[in-house]
Each structure stands twice: as structure tokens, then as C-alpha cells.
Image (spheres, rainbow, N blue to C red):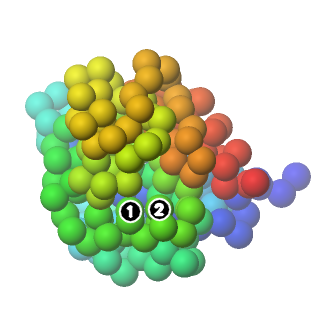
């Protein structure tokens, strides 16, 4: 059986302080399904540190393949934004990341954000009128960005898929894979 994502390219954002589970589980799941995976961050060939116990003292993540500004949205089928605290805080203030999110959204490409990764969607201003979920502590941020926040584990609104936290990774990834194969 051919992997379901053969021929698809998925970009996975990376920064110091993203949640390790929300990085590594998608990393291996998309590779298992045959996707070409691009780990992207502010710079290419950088190894970021995961969230860990104190925000940025966790496990090393996979090295970035490419700087986010060099990701071609036309040649990329999906974008995944892991959570954590410090990682999303950096990414939401990184203009090349926000440009990529907007470009993917404008093209109707699959965008998945989990946990506090939704902060990046808030800063990119792509949530207005969308139904989304997140941890309860940032529900107000999503509502203030014009989204309809719902208390569900995983929510899909068109090409945008959101999930509350790493405990929802199985459903989050199943939903992203389904969207990428439609």
C-alpha cells in the first residue's frame, strides 16, 4: 500500500520552546505517511530546543531544513504549527512566519495549529469568522481575533485545523492527513 501522503509536502514550524510532543509526533507521522517534510524556522540548519520543564530546556528538535521565508507556499501542501509557550510567542512576532501563514491561507492550503500554536494564527489575522479550538487560557485571544471558539478537542473549519493540546494529537493528525488527501 502506497503511503497516503506520497507526493505531498508539509512544512513543520520550529523554534526554541515549541512543545516536543507537538513537534516530534507530527514529524514522524507525516514521514511515515510518505510526505516530504520541511522543518522550517527563522534560519536554516538550526537545532532548536523543545519546551521541556522550564520553557526552553527540553529535547533537541530536528534541524531546520529551510528558513521559513524560503518556503514556497505554492509548492507546499500543508503547514503545521506546534504549541508550547515560548516557541509560539517567537513565531507570532516573526514576520516571515506570518507572511507564510497568510500565503498558505490565501491559497486554501491545509494549516494545522495545536495548543498555543493558534497564537500564530491570531497574529497572522487568519481566524476571522472561523470555528476553532485551543486551550481555554487563550480562548479570549481567539475570540478577539474574530474566531468562534468552541470547547472541543479537534476542530476543522475548511482548510484550518486546530486542536487543544498534545493529548489530541491522534485526532489532530488524522484530520490533517484526511484534509491533505482530499
Is residue 22 visible in the rendered structure shown here?
no
Q: Residue 1 vs residue 98: left or right?
A: right
- Disc sitting over residue 149 in the figure: none
Camera-side residue of 101 and 58? 101
Camera-side residue of 98 and 85? 98
Q: Which residue is mark 2?
A: 105
Residue 11, x across and y down, in percent: 47, 63
Marks 2 and 1: CB-CB under 8 Å? yes
Q: CA distance from mark 2 to mark 1?
A: 6 Å
Residue furthest to the left in view is 54
Is residue 76 visible in the rendered structure shown here?
yes
Camera-side residue of 73 and 15? 73
Residue 55, x across and y down, in percent: 14, 36
Looking at the image, which residue is at 49% across and 53% down?
111
Camera-side residue of 64 and 42? 42
SS assignment at label 2: helix
- Disc sitting over residue 101 in the figure: 1
Amino acid at each position: 500500500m502506497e503511503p497516503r501522503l506520497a507526493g505531498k509536502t508539509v512544512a513543520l514550524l520550529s523554534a526554541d520552546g515549541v512543545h516536543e510532543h507537538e513537534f516530534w509526533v507530527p514529524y514522524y507521522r507525516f514521514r511515515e505517511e510518505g510526505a516530504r517534510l520541511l522543518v522550517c524556522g527563522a534560519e536554516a540548519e538550526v537545532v532548536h530546543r523543545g519546551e521541556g520543564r522550564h520553557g526552553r530546556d527540553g529535547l533537541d528538535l530536528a534541524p531546520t531544513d529551510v528558513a521559513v521565508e524560503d518556503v514556497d507556499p505554492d509548492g507546499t501542501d500543508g503547514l503545521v504549527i506546534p504549541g508550547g509557550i515560548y516557541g509560539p510567542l517567537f513565531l507570532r512576532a516573526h514576520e516571515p512566519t506570518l507572511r507564510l501563514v497568510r500565503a498558505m491561507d490565501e491559497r486554501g492550503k491545509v494549516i494545522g495549529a495545536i495548543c498555543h500554536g493558534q497564537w500564530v494564527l491570531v497574529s497572522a489575522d487568519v481566524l476571522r469568522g472561523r470555528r476553532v479550538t485551543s486551550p481555554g487560557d487563550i480562548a479570549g485571544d481567539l475570540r478577539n481575533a474574530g474566531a468562534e471558539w468552541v470547547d472541543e478537542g479537534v476542530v476543522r473549519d475548511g482548510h484550518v485545523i486546530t486542536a487543544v493540546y498534545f493529548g489530541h494529537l491522534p485526532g489532530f493528525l488524522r484530520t490533517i492527513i484526511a484534509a491533505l488527501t482530499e
